[in-house]
Amino acid sequence: MSEALPASGGWQSGDDVGRRLFFTFADDRPFALDSGAVLTDVTIAYETWGELAPDASNAILVCHAWTGDSHAAGRAGRGHLAPGWWDALIGPGKAIDTNRWFVVCSNVLGGCQGSTGPASVDPGDANGRRYGPRFPVVTIRDMVRAQSRLAAHLGVGRWASVIGGSMGGMQVLEWAATYPRRVGSVIPIATCLQSTAQQIAWGMIGRRAIALDPHWNGGDYYDAPDGEGPGAGLSVARQVAQVTFRSDNVFTERFGRGINDRSSGEGFGLWGEFQVESYLAYHGEKLARRFDTNSYLVISKAMDLHDIARGRQSVEAALRGFTGPCLSIGVSSDMLYPSYQQRQIADAFIAAGVAADYLEIGSPHGHDAFLMETEQVGAPIARFLDRLQSGNA
């Protein structure tokens, strides 16, 4: 990757839409956020697979993680730089079988792949400027409330299931708490009921790395030429996160103390000596080419603020109206959202009187196993959905 990084890697109006569809709401009255701010003319980008049943009983919402988007399934191509992030699980005959289910995935509010976010043009700005740093803080609950508007637009009164991993799992839990009668079942994966101090700390470090990049310019960088945006800060933030996505065993097995090519005979330098450094630099730059820095900040903060008990007395009280069932899936080597948090999720649903099971995936890949171990993740999801459809869940 030698070309200069773009000021923003987010999708923009005028770019190829690919498989994206768009729904706009709050054009008649403002959309109120948890922060007290309001948005107007909110657009949500989404994709669908399969056919909605006449009674709309077969709809499944799949929720994406931090830097994901609506392209959960399908090939790379015009409008989509990479194949669907869960392509191995969604499609005809796959774990989430689109011959049976109508599947929806939307880019979250605050995202940068077609939904309203910091890189979007502010409809209230007389000069047609993008929101940039003026975009308000949003919460996972705000994201879910925006998805509920999309559900109504699609004619889905009740999701048969809501499924997602990591930040997607946070949305799953908020659906169960906020709209318990509009969700038939949930599958939260590698996530948490409430972000812990350590999880918040990781997020803060990444955000500080961005803020220290002078090219971030307080969030006003959209007019900067290639190479003069905050790509360096975003790259470092991603590198920090990437360490938490994988396990120590995977890093050791893949890189160990491997040294980069030293055939030039030069002495040791401060930077780029180890293969793991090159790996992290690659992933940082890769994200900077497809994501918006301000969007990364907004979504990171939303994850830190995640707490389904906020304003609801307790976790048990938050889940009390949901009737289930729930399948909570954890990863044995997950250091970011340790498996004990997935057990807590199952226990919380049980305490609220909901049928819930916990399943742990044995994988060395850490947090990212929910994206990589598609057979281990897909098989229990398929069984759960089979029971759901037969009425035996």
Image (cartoon, rainbow, N blue to C red):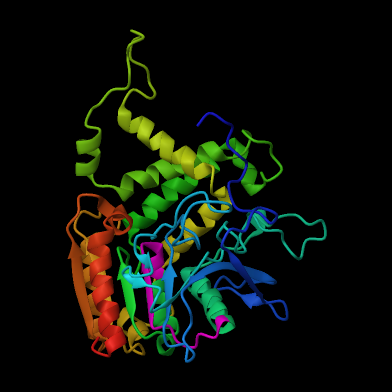
Quarter location, residue 193: bottom left
Residue at the location (17% across, 58% down)?
362
Q: Give residue 237's position: percent from left, percent from top.
A: 45, 44
Residue 324 visible in the picture: no
Seen as rendered, the residue at the extreme top is 265
Q: Give residue 389's position: percent from left, percent from top.
A: 31, 85
The verdict on residue 299 being magenta is no
Quarter location, residue 284: top left
Q: Nearer the viewer, residue 236 or 378?
A: 378
Q: Give residue 323's position: percent from left, percent from top.
A: 32, 89
Quarter location, residue 7: top right
Image vertical order of residue 278 relative to residue 325, above or below: above
Horizontally, residue 285 falls left or right of residue 110, namely: left
Q: How many marks?
A: 0
Question: Image quadrant for the C terminus?
Answer: bottom left
Horizontally, residue 52 falls left or right of residue 279, namely: right
Image vertical order of residue 135 relative to residue 158, above or below: above
Residue at the location (69% across, 39% down)?
224
Give the magenta-colored segment's residue range.
154-170
Image vertical order of residue 77 relative to residue 340, above or below: above
Seen as rendered, the residue at the extreme left is 362
